[in-house]
Structures are given as C-alpha cells and as structure tokens.
C-alpha cells in the first residue's frame, strides 16, 4: 500500500464514481499525543476517512470541517481537511463508549455538522443532519441523500496502524451515459464483498481489479494527505502578547507557569516565569526598534 493517498476512479459501465483513501503516517501522527480508548479511536479513524472522502467529492479552496456533537460518552469528534490535503482532528470523551454505534456512543440527539470555509472570503456552507443508522458510514450516506440527493455507499476500516475508506456514488442523471438500471446495484453488491482487511492492506489497482474486473474502470491521478496542524510556538507567543504582560504574569504567579494545549493536535506550549520575561522583553525590544525606524 502507498502511504496517505486519496484516489478517484470511475466505473464507466455502471455510471458510478468512487474514491479510495488510505492513511497510515497521517493516522499515526493524529494519535501520537493522545491515548484514545479503542472505540473512540475507531470512531476518530472513521471520521478521518470520511472527511478525506467528503473533501474529495467537491472542489473548494479552503477547509472542510466535519463535526459530530452529542451528550453521550463521546461528546465531540472533529476533523478538518484543507483543499491541499492537510488534515488534523481529535475526539473528546467523558467515558469510553461500549459501542461505536452512533446513537450509543454520541447520544440519541447527536448531530453531524459539515462546514466548508473558503479562503476567498465567501460565505461558509454548513450542513447539519442527525446521526442516522448503526454506523458513521450510515450517517454519511444519510448526509448525501439529504444534501445532494445522490445514492452513496461508504465503507470504513480502522486499525492501530492504518485507516481506509471506500466511497461509491451514483452519477447525477445529467452525467450518466449508460442506460443500465442495474449499474448501481451491481457496483454496490460487488463492493459489499470486500473485507476490512482487504480494504486496509490491498493497493487500489489490485482492489479495483478484484471487484470490477468485468467492468470498465477509469483511474485518475491520486492526491496525497498528511497530518498538519496550524498551531505553532509563534502563534502561541502572539496570543500571550495579545493578553498583555501584566495578565500573563498574574497567571504565572498564581499557577507557576502558563500551559496552552492545541485543541487539534494536543501539542502543549509551556511558559515559566523566565520564558514569559524573555517573551515580553523580546516583544518590547522589537517594538522599540520598530518605533526607532519610524
């Protein structure tokens, strides 16, 4: 298997388009700083695969965010993916859920929220649907049925070392070229035979040949995915500077240090009294230099 790829294909004889995503280094980086219970890890892995597949179905210049919120044992699941394939995400839980069935893990009233934000300043798109069915895959199918009225089938497989996903979608009627009422049923029936192990360990060409060697399949160029978080020491420095030296010093005096954790990658940025003094000394020194230049 090639690492961290999203691949598109078209089953021409069935009027069905599809995507395969496989994450390993990205998945390892996403879990590197947090010990997730097994069922929480499975849900997060499925969300990573789902977000990558969702982002691959549209053209956008910005980021897509998939959130699941509820009042169950797992109360937050969020994954972001940018148009250039940078991903980050996390899960928050109160207790380890006994099941990955959505209404059991997230609560009966949980919602899935898909947000697409453009870097060009356009109004963001947001779609909100209740979690439906016995899996996150069922909820994704429900989202497409509600938002785009497209037949969709999704498959996920998650292990400690990798995450994979397969999405099949019937072409819109305006794009269909075959008068084959059985095309969608045939494509999904064949996909139903795939095992989670095959999905995790088989390369795209081999997998598609096993499933659709009697169909005409066209492959498109793959794109890479990676775990990249936008947090940084510089951003954290600037946030503290924005609070002001007096307030930050008060926190240090009360707590002994300032500790800031990134919500997406759980990276910690710690500042003791010496760090804070150096931070504001450097800031004031830069400001002084700037004023001198003017």
Image (cartoon, rainbow, N blue to C red):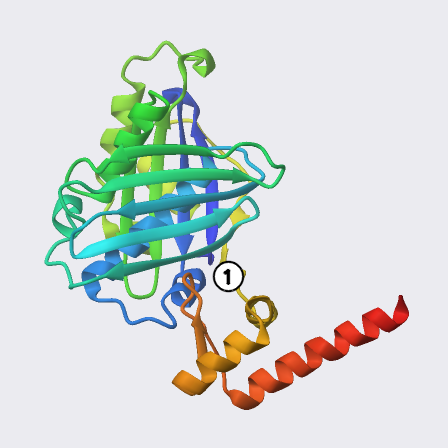
The residue at 30%/24% (across/down) is 146
Quick check: 178 above or below 70?
Answer: above
The residue at 45%/29% (across/down) is 10
Where the C terminus falls, by quadrant? bottom right
How far across and how far down the image is residue 254, in percent?
Answer: 40, 84
How far across and how far down the image is residue 258, in percent?
Answer: 46, 79
Where the N terminus falls, by quadrant? bottom left
Whether residue 165 sits left or right of residue 37 in the image: it is right
Whether residue 81 sits left or right of residue 99 in the image: it is right
Specify the quadrant of the image occupied by residue 289.
bottom right
- The local secondary structure at tag 1 comes to loop
How far across and how far down the image is residue 168, in percent?
Answer: 34, 32
How far across and how far down the image is residue 90, in percent?
Answer: 35, 59
Quick check: 143 above or below 156?
Answer: above
The residue at 14%/58% (across/down) is 97
Return the residue nearer the eye: 120 or 15: 120
Crowd rating for badge 1 (residues with CA inside 10 Å; few <14, some 14–19, many 20+): some
The residue at 33%/65% (across/down) is 161
Number of numbered discs overlaid on the protein picture: 1
Q: Name the residue under label 1.
A: 229
Residue furthest top in the image: 179
Residue furthest right in the image: 293
Quick check: 223 above or below 218?
Answer: below
Whether residue 48 sits left or right of residue 38 in the image: it is right
- Residue 164 at least partly seen: no
């Amino acid at each position: 298997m090639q690492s961290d790829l999203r691949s598109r294909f078209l089953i021409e004889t069935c009027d069905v388009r599809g995507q395969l995503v496989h994450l390993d280094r990205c998945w390892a980086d996403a879990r590197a700083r947090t010990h997730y219970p097994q069922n929480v890890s499975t849900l997060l892995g499925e969300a990573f695969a789902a977000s990558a597949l969702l982002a691959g179905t549209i053209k956008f210049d910005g980021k897509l965010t998939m959130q699941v919120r509820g009042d169950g044992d797992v109360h937050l699941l969020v994954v972001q993916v940018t148009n250039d394939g940078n991903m980050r995400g996390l899960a928050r839980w109160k207790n380890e859920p006994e099941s990955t069935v959505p209404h059991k893990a997230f609560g009966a009233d949980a919602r899935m929220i898909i947000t697409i934000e453009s870097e060009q300043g356009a109004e963001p798109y947001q779609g909100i649907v209740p979690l439906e069915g016995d899996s996150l895959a069922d909820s994704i199918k429900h989202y497409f049925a509600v938002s785009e009225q497209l037949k969709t089938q999704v498959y996920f497989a998650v292990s400690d070392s990798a995450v994979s996903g397969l999405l099949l979608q019937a072409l819109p009627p305006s794009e269909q070229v075959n008068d084959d009422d059985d095309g969608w049923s045939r494509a999904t029936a064949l996909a139903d035979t795939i095992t989670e192990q095959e999905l995790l360990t088989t390369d795209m060409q081999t997998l598609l040949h096993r499933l659709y060697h009697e169909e005409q399949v066209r492959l498109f160029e793959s794109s890479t995915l990676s775990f990249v978080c936008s947090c940084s020491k510089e951003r954290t420095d600037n946030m503290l500077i924005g609070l002001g030296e007096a307030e930050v010093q008060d926190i240090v005096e009360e707590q002994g240090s300032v500790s800031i954790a990134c919500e997406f990658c759980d990276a910690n940025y710690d500042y003791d009294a010496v760090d804070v003094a150096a931070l504001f000394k450097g800031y004031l020194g830069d400001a002084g230099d700037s004023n001198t230049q003017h």
